[in-house]
Image: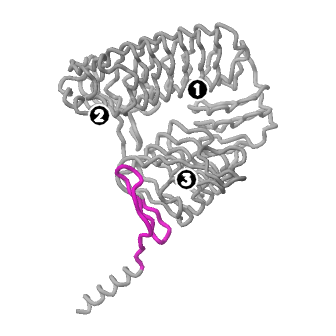
Amino acid sequence: MKKILLSLLLLVGMTSYAQSVVDSGKCGDNVTWKLYDNGSLVISGSGKMTDYSHFYYPVSTGYENSGSASEGYSDSESYSDTPWNEIKDNISTVVIESGVTSIGDNSFYNCTSLTSIAIPRGITTIGDWAFYGCSSLSSIPIPSSVVKIGELAFWGCSSLVNIIIPESVVSIGFRAFGGCSSLPVVDNIRYADTYAVEAIDKTLSTYALKDGTRFVGSEAFESSSLSSITIPESVISIGIGAFNKCYSLPVVDNIRYADTYVVEVTDRTLSSYSLKEGTRIIGSWAFADCQSLASISLPESVVSIGYEAFYGCFSLSNITIPASVKNIERCAFWGCGKLTTFSIPEGVISIEERVFCSCSSLTSVILPKSLTDIGDGAFLGCSSLTSITIPASVTSIGDLSFNGCSSLREIHCHNITPPTALEETFRDTDINSCSLYVPIGSGDLYSNAEVWKDFGNIVEENVSRVSSVEEEQGNAIYYNLLGNRVTDLQSGIYIQRTGNKSRKVFIR
């Protein structure tokens, strides 16, 4: 009897300290949220969180205006459309439970009282502006499942002193860590772990990035007196405008360089350029609007082609992409109207947004077996494209990806499971005249899948299984997200190939 009474007293005591739910709702198709009276916001469920927006009030009138920050606006006059926006000042802790796969855009925009967050393994994307203005956050644990960190994701996290960016991350957006004034400084450069945020003293002429640096932030050295910099081979991405207006950097054969990084061409009227040996990264806007450029060959050392690198090169009809290239950033070849063929090398895992937009003469493109997704508007306006083979590894095709591909007559989709596609993926493309070829046995799946079911002619075909002996034996081969084969698997995300099938896997 005493034991029963004691148990009841303990239960009553625990109940008296239990937290109450203040508010709750949905924040994704299969994701819900609850805010407790102790300031804890718990997000649970499965799949992606909703992407939200933020808005500004003009200083002078007080009327609402949507958009992004501009002159005459301040953070104190902004708000987001998250369901917890009106009570965001009560949020001190965020707990995201396993099963959720993304943190949506603007999710915790200006949550200035937020001091801690728990992010589970399984999250792959941290959205644009996700933690913008979270000025009380001092530490953010990023799990090894995260692949992408969005634009301005941590902007203004002024208390942030500690962050570890796992090697799984291959993309960090524009000024993601801007305004993080408490991050450590090494040799006059502020760092967020392996991400070089910005130069502190821009009057210096020489800088050396620390060993292990993987990213250089957008505008990091803009308008500095920089004339020499050492960029380690560990660097895989350099942000937009990182060396913009660094006019003291050396010029070789009409090309300005920051070590092994192509900043810009100094004469955009030429029809050909020769890159120096050892060049690793073609920078954002490097050859943009070189309207006379007809042909260019990239050295085998190049690993990345930047944002709008060849934008508006209307005369470019031939470019050799070496096997070393693992990353082609968004809009890289936008408007290259004379480009007729293109081969994307193995190891590239994503065709980013509008990479081949308005390449109106493009008739053939070869996609690698490492590819997992085709971004929004990737082939928008490729009106001469007649046929394309989508590898079995592709699981997602974005909005307007094949918009305006009016000559497209054959799509060979090798994935047994229909890739996710959106209502506007094939907008202004005559899918009634385009035959969709799918693996034997998957015809019914495509005939019942959203978007794919609208094709007028779905044909099953025998997908070739010609591959290496090792693959034919059924042994799984693993690649990291840079496309490099690995045998010593650590915790993280990999591309697994078995035979002719590829998929993303998470190793715990």
Which residue in the protein does label 3 denote?
A: 80
**Where is residue 248 drawn, in percent x and y?**
79, 26
Region in magenta: 17-42
Identify residue type, mark 3.
Answer: Ser
- The tag earlier along the polypeptide, 2 or 3, is 3
How many neighbours does mark 3 have within 10 angstroms: few (below 14), some (14-19), or many (20 or more)?
Answer: many
For residue 270, side relative to residue 442 (left or right)? right
CA gap, disc 2 to disc 3? 31 Å
Amino acid residing under circle 2:
Glu
Task: Report which residue position mark 2 lands on.
Answer: 450
Q: Principal SS element in the magenta part?
A: strand
Q: Are marks 2 and 3 in contact (CB under 8 Å)?
A: no
Q: Is residue 140 above or below residue 391?
A: below
Q: Which residue is mark 1?
A: 306
Amino acid marked by disc 1: Gly
Between label 1 and label 3, give the one nearer the viewer. Answer: 3
Nearest the viewer among 76 and 420 is 76
Instruction: State the residue lying farthest toward the bottom.
Output: 2
